[in-house]
Amino acid sequence: MVLLDGAHRLRALKMLGAYLAPVAIVNYDAVELRGWVRLYAYGPEALADLRQVAEVLEVKERPGGALLVRLGGGDQAYYDLLSFERRGNELQGVVAPSSLARLHHRTLAVIPPPPSKDLVLRAALTGRLLPPRSTRHITEAKRLVYKIPLSSLMGSPVTT
């Protein structure tokens, strides 16, 4: 079994001492996978940092000041973005690629290659997590609402 979404939340639950976590089991073949455009503070230093750690294919300035940066490098681009963020370039948000036309402020909009299901499975199985907000899983399970108090996850481990 592989955790597809919420790995960072699961890690936080473990740090809080939780023994349980709510989950929904889905057939991964039925899940649509998309990526996000990652938004960072605009500046020549940020672009220089990105060029040092990632394969930059294209840089294009949009009206209003947004700088669009398309990355190459396949799956490695996601780990390159982790290096970029470790250099102090804080993720300010994510948007769907279809929303790029609505960016009208000074921001560095980084467009990584589309994520693959193989990348997600490898990351989950090896424990080498992707940066938060790297993937967007489209599934009916996202519509489920769990109202579970944190205190109910903190009890003793369940034994059978």
Image: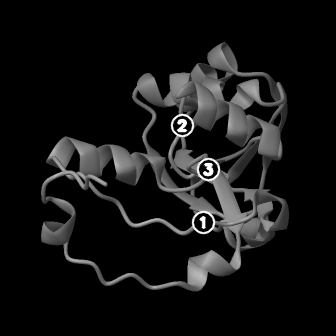
Residue at 73%, 24% in the rendered image? 76
Q: Tell me where residue 122 sits by quadrant.
A: top right
Amino acid of disc 2: Gly
Q: CA distance from mark 3 to mark 2?
A: 15 Å
Residue at 60%, 52% in the rendered image? 4
Whether residue 75 is situated above or below residue 121 in the rendered picture: above
Residue 43: mark = 2
- Give the farthest residue toward the front: 160
**Circle 2 — which element?**
loop
Residue 99: mark = none
Q: Circle 2: is it few (<14), some (14-19), or many (20+) Cα within 10 Å?
A: few
- Whether residue 45 is visible, yes or no, is no
**Circle 1 — which element?**
loop
Q: CA distance from mark 2 to mark 1?
A: 42 Å
Colour scheme in use: one colour
Residue at 61%, 31% in the rendered image? 125
Mark found first going from the N terminus, 3 or 2? 3
Q: Position of residue 53 (x, y in %)?
A: 64, 17
Q: CA distance from mark 3 to mark 1?
A: 28 Å
Q: Are marks 2 and 1 in contact (CB under 8 Å)?
A: no
- Whether residue 78 is visible, yes or no, is yes
Q: Nearer the viewer, residue 137 or 17?
A: 17
Mark found first going from the N terminus, 2 or 1? 1
Q: Nearer the viewer, residue 123 or 74?
A: 123
Amino acid of disc 1: Ile
Comparing labels 3 and 1, the label whose residue is closer to the camera: 1
Q: Nearer the viewer, residue 33 or 49?
A: 33
* Residue under pointer 3: 38
Q: Nearer the viewer, residue 63 or 90?
A: 90
Q: Exactly how many numbered labels are in the figure?
A: 3
Residue 25: mark = 1
